[in-house]
Image (cartoon, rainbow, N blue to C red):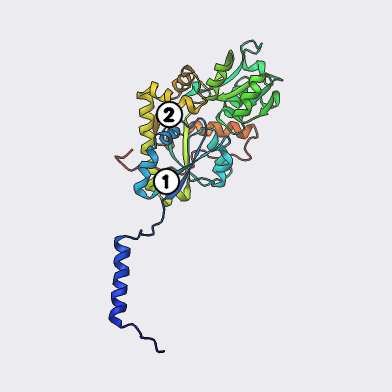
């Protein structure tokens, strides 16, 4: 039996019908939003605010991006490895280590200094009252952190070095447990862990960062990402500025937002940590990186980095004029 071939007209009608079906009812195949990977620490307060409020997700959606959040206790490794795109605020000492490792990173913002937010503490009943009293003692510190520099600089000012103490290199959560259990004679730490420790037991501040460093916190981004997506970095920068302004204008609401995230802490503890931070986000000015050089020099002298570096010779992204 012979088959009847369809006419060209019927094929044309069938094709038009299929096209109409696609146009009217079938969902179009679209690429999903691209992830922008963002690193965080417990101390990354402004990014915590943007995450909880959903602000950054909302702002990035029109650009075809969605944020993915990655919490780290040690940030130097993921920063040097390029494991994420945009990095949350890190203590002033951290970029010295990443620059020494030749990590391809660009500064895109900084949080104005807050030296009281880093301190070297001892139990209240300890006989240690000065930095000189740390000689021969076990001192906890997180390697490569801002508190690492505070400890190094405080020892140098007292005429001591790391060879005069017994450094215990512990990440902040481990240091908290060791300090609480009495395994450390002293602990060099930053907020909010400083506030946590002060709430757990009576402590004495032997020294904070005052006179040693301003403790600016810097925000960095991968070179390749900022080159390809400067508009995303601009959105993130503006959102950080606004989040900082919200923190300063709404301290009670800020405490209510952070307390459950930090483990249902008493409001007074969260308020204490917040009171020692400025949350004032601003552009990075190369002329204001002199303290970074001082940190680099101390770290080199203490053999914490393998070579001398020019801490001011770093890539800096600037917000578009009138949009910062």
In the picture, the disc for residue 202 is none
Q: Where residue 95 sits: x, y (%)? A: 53, 38
Tell which tag, 2 or 1, sits nearer the viewer: 1
Tell me if residue 209 can be seen.
yes
Q: CA distance from mark 2 to mark 1?
A: 28 Å
Q: Is residue 314 above or below residue 259?
A: below
Q: 24 or 85, which lies in front? A: 24
Q: Where residue 51 sits: x, y (%)? A: 43, 36
Tell me if residue 318 can be seen.
no
Q: 128 or 83, which lies in front? A: 83
**For this view, does 244 lie left or right of residue 75?**
left
Q: Where residue 80 sits: x, y (%)? A: 56, 44
Q: Where residue 106 sits: x, y (%)? A: 47, 43
User: Which residue is identified by label 1?
Assistant: 66
User: Which residue is identified by label 2?
Assistant: 112
Q: Earlier in the sequence, mark 2 or mark 1?
A: 1
* Quarter of the rendering containing residue 302: top right
**For this view, does 157 lie left or right of residue 244?**
right
Q: Secondary structure at mark 2?
A: loop
Q: Is residue 76 above or below residue 253?
A: below
* Quarter of the rendering containing residue 1: bottom left
Q: Given the current orientation, which residue lies at the most extreme bottom position?
A: 1
How many numbered markers are drawn?
2
For mark 2, does the 10 Å Cα neighbourhood hold few (<14), some (14 to 19), or many (20 or more) residues? some
* Quarter of the rendering containing residue 175: top right
Name the residue: 65% across, 16% down: 132
For mark 1, does the 10 Å Cα neighbourhood hold few (<14), some (14 to 19), or many (20 or more) residues? some
């Amino acid at each position: 039996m012979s088959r009847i071939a369809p006419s060209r007209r019927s094929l044309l009608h069938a094709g038009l019908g299929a096209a109409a079906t696609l146009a009217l009812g079938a969902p179009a195949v679209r690429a999903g939003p691209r992830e922008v990977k963002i690193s965080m620490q417990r101390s990354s307060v402004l990014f915590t605010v943007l995450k909880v409020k959903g602000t950054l997700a909302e702002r990035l959606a029109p650009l075809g991006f969605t944020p993915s959040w990655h919490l780290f206790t040690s940030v130097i490794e993921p920063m040097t490895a390029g494991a994420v795109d945009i990095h949350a605020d890190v203590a002033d000492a951290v970029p010295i280590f990443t620059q020494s490792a030749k990590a391809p990173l660009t500064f895109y913002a900084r949080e104005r200094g807050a030296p009281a937010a880093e301190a070297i503490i001892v139990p209240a009943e300890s006989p240690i009252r000065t930095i000189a009293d740390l000689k021969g003692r076990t001192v906890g510190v997180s390697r490569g952190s801002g508190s690492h520099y505070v400890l190094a600089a405080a020892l140098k000012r007292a005429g001591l070095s790391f060879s005069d103490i017994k450094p215990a290199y512990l990440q902040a959560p481990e240091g908290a447990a060791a300090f609480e259990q009495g395994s450390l004679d002293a602990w060099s730490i930053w907020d909010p862990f400083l506030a946590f420790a002060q709430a757990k037991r009576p402590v004495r501040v032997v020294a904070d960062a005052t006179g040693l460093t301003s403790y600016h916190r810097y925000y960095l981004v991968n070179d390749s990402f900022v080159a390809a997506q400067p508009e995303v970095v601009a959105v993130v920068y503006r959102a950080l500025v606004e989040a900082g302004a919200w923190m300063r204008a709404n301290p009670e609401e800020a405490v209510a937002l952070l307390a459950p995230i930090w483990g249902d802490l008493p409001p007074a503890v969260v308020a204490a940590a917040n009171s020692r931070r400025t949350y004032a986000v601003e552009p990075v000015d190369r002329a204001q990186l002199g303290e970074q050089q001082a940190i680099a020099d101390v770290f080199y002298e203490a053999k914490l980095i393998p070579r001398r570096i020019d801490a001011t010779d770093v890539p800096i992204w600037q917000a578009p004029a009138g949009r910062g």
